Amino acid sequence: MTLPSQFEATNGFPRDQISLANWRTRPYSFWAFRNVSEMVRSARIRTSNPRPLPPLATNPSLLAQPASPGSDHSVASLLELAQVDSFLVSRDGKMISEWHAAGVERSDPHLVFSISKSVAALIAGILEDQGALDPETPVGDIVPEMRGSAYEDATVRHLLDMRVSLDFDESYLSQDAYARYRRAMAWNPSVGDESETAGMLAFLRTLDKADHAHGGDHAYLSPNSDMLGIVLERASGERFSDLCARLLWEPMEATADAFITVDNLGAPRTAGGMSLRPHDLLAIGQMLLDGGTGPRGRIVSERWISDMRTAGDTGVWARGTQADFLPHGRYRSNWYQVGGDSDAFLAAGIHGQFLYCDPATATVIVCASSQHEPQSDSLDQPMLRMFAALASAG
């Protein structure tokens, strides 16, 4: 009898069972989401002066309390139900709770999917403040290859606010357009079509405009944020990984290097490819609550943060494709605002990724998860109620 390897004994399956065909499904995602650079080629986002991880802040009483008023779940049982891998809560800049699923090391990086969009928007905001990027510039003026495509006359602002007119279906389990998109980003196995190896830019050039003008209602479409990454590289003359390191990771004194997946030609997957420690995601939220400052001073302007938090249009959101996610919400610069009587804002990604920030109580919450399904309203809504309850308890 052959004894299982240490990997199999730890994870419940041998390493050679994980492939590009299954790495985003359970049980494989539990390991793969913390080891993405082994699955998909990735660029390193370096930090030159890393901070140590904070002391572990266990908080059994917080985990034992009801997840939200009237909930049948405790915080701990909801985290387990939602297949959360890491859960962090801070208040006034200090950790008050930290929980990790069995088998997760607190130093592990984690794929954050579409929270990558929100990080890319921060980089766009910094470049705007430096005068290196005008959000009203058409994409075709920055990336000439996009002339003749849907993106030619879309502005950078349209990309940031998900108001691009694009004939594309954001169906994560689709075997048609979204599967071609994932092959172009090198996240799915090839089916032998040479066009797949041409990379993200070539794929984006093939997308057509929908039957309405840019600037309409909110339409959440991930290719917009991969287009944003290419725009940022062209506007700055730097690779996104280097740009993010220089403008955010090093000034923030992140605890560890981050990673971003890249396509066959090195284009960044800014729509969903970032992997980072949950503690560094928490630090991004804290930096925003601190008015855009970090250990070395100003990172993002107060003007940009104020615009992100207040300039979203409730009508554009209510008529858009994500209105059920936040009934009173808004969207601006790739960040969500809860709206209604709440000033909270958040970044979110599929498979259960959240960064929730509540200015009223100076609370930041991070959830990094490996949910089997890409999207689940039956999990998202209880999680959002839990975040609001935990923040209001401040």
Image (tube, grey):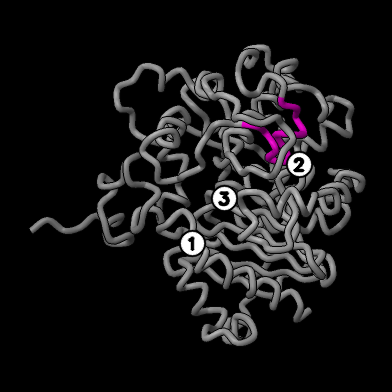
Closest to the observer: 244 or 82? 82
The magenta region covers 154-165
Residue at the (53%, 59%) spot, across then down: 352
Where is residue 391 drawn, in percent x and y? 74, 74
Between disc 2 and disc 1, the foreground one is 1
Say if 236 sits above or below 147 in the image. Answer: below
Q: Where residue 202 sits in the image (x, y, percent)?
A: 52, 18
Question: In screen coordinates, is 13 left or right of 95?
Answer: left
In the image, farthest residue toward the front: 211
- The residue type indicated by label 1 comes to Ser
SS of the residue under disc 2: helix
Mark 2 or mark 1: whose residue is earlier in sequence: 2
Residue 361's disc is none
Cα distance, mark 3 to mark 1? Answer: 16 Å
Q: Is residue 99 magenta?
A: no
The residue singled out by tag 3 in the image is: 112
Residue 289 at what x, y percent from top left?
A: 83, 59
Q: Is residue 234 left or right of residue 361?
A: left
Q: Quadrant of residue 5?
A: bottom left
Which is in the foreground here, disc 3 or disc 1? 1
